[in-house]
Image: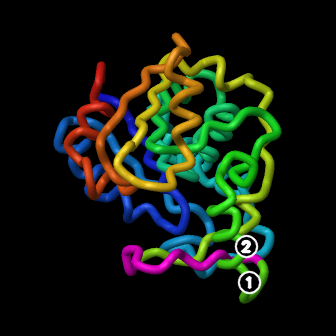
Amino acid sequence: MTTFVLVPGGWRGGWYFSGLADRLRTAGHRALTVTPTGVGDRAHLSSANVNLDTHIDDVLAVLAVEQVGDAVLVGHSYGGMVITGAADRAPSGVVRRLVYADAYVPKDGQSCWDLTTDAYRALFLDGAAADGYAVQPPPGRDPRVTAHPLASFLQRIRLDAAGLRDVKTRDYVYLSGWDGTPFTAVRDRLADDPNWRVHTLDSGHDVWRDAPQEFLEILLLGE
C-alpha cells in the first residue's frame, strides 16, 4: 500500500483532490489531501504572513502527524513549489516519489513569481490590489476557490538538496490542451533528463476535471 499526499494548486483547498483520493483508496492505497493555510476551509487563517514556508510546513505537519513514510507527494500547479520544499525538508525515508501535474519545479532561490509568465504575474498583483496580500481567484473558476496568499507566490524557496536526494522517482505530467501555459519550458527542460519520467496529456490545466482516468493511471505506475 502506497501513501499519496495530494497538494492542490493556487486558490484551491484539499477538496480539489477529494475525488482522486477516493479513487486511490478504492485501488487499495492511502490518500491524504492537504489544504494550505489561508485557502479553502482554512481561508479564515489568511494573513499577510502566510507564505511558501507556511505551506511547506503544512505538508510536513501532515507527514508527521499521520506518521507517513515512503510517501508519494503529488503537486498541481503552484503545489509543485510546496512538494519540492516538503521533500527537501522531510526526514530521510519519508518521501520516495514526486509527481508534478502541470506544476512549477523550482531550483534553490526560485519563486513561483520567477518561474511563471508576465500574464500570471499581473494576475497575482491585480488580484491582491484590494488588501495587498490576498490574491482573489480569476473569474469563472469553481465556486469553492478562495483568495490565495500573495506571499506564497513571491517567496523564493530555500533548498539544500538533503531530502531531495532520497527521492527515487520523479514524474512530470505536462497538460498540453490549453493556451497560455507557463509549463512548456518546464516540460522541455525535463524531457531529456534521465532522472525524470515526462508524460503529456491532451488536457486543460484542471487535470482532475479534464483527464481523471489518465492522471490516475500515471499515479499508479509501479505502485
- Is residue 14 shown left or right of residue 115? left
Judged by its main secondary structure, the magenta piece is loop
Q: Which residue of the protein is positioned furthest toward the bottom in this rendering?
A: 130
Picture disc at residue 125: 2
Which image quadrant for residue 220? top left
Q: Which residues are magenta?
A: 133-143
In the figure, 91 relative to 165: above or below?
A: below
Mark 1, residue position: 129
Q: Amino acid at mark 2?
A: Leu
SS type, badge 2: helix
In this rendering, does residue 123 appear at all? yes
- Dot 1 amino acid type: Ala
Marks 1,2: beta carbons within 8 A: yes
Residue at the far front in the pictured view: 179
Please tell me whether residue 137 belongs to the stretch shown in magenta. Answer: yes
Q: Is residue 60 visible?
A: no
Q: Position of residue 76 (x, y in %)?
A: 47, 49
Picture layout, residue 91 above or below residue 197:
below
10 Å crowding of disc 1: few (<14), some (14-19), many (20+) = few
Q: Nearer the viewer, residue 55 or 25?
A: 55
For mark 1, give the secondary structure.
loop
Q: Residue at x 54, y 28 (%)?
A: 188
Whether residue 14 sits left or right of residue 215 in the image: it is right
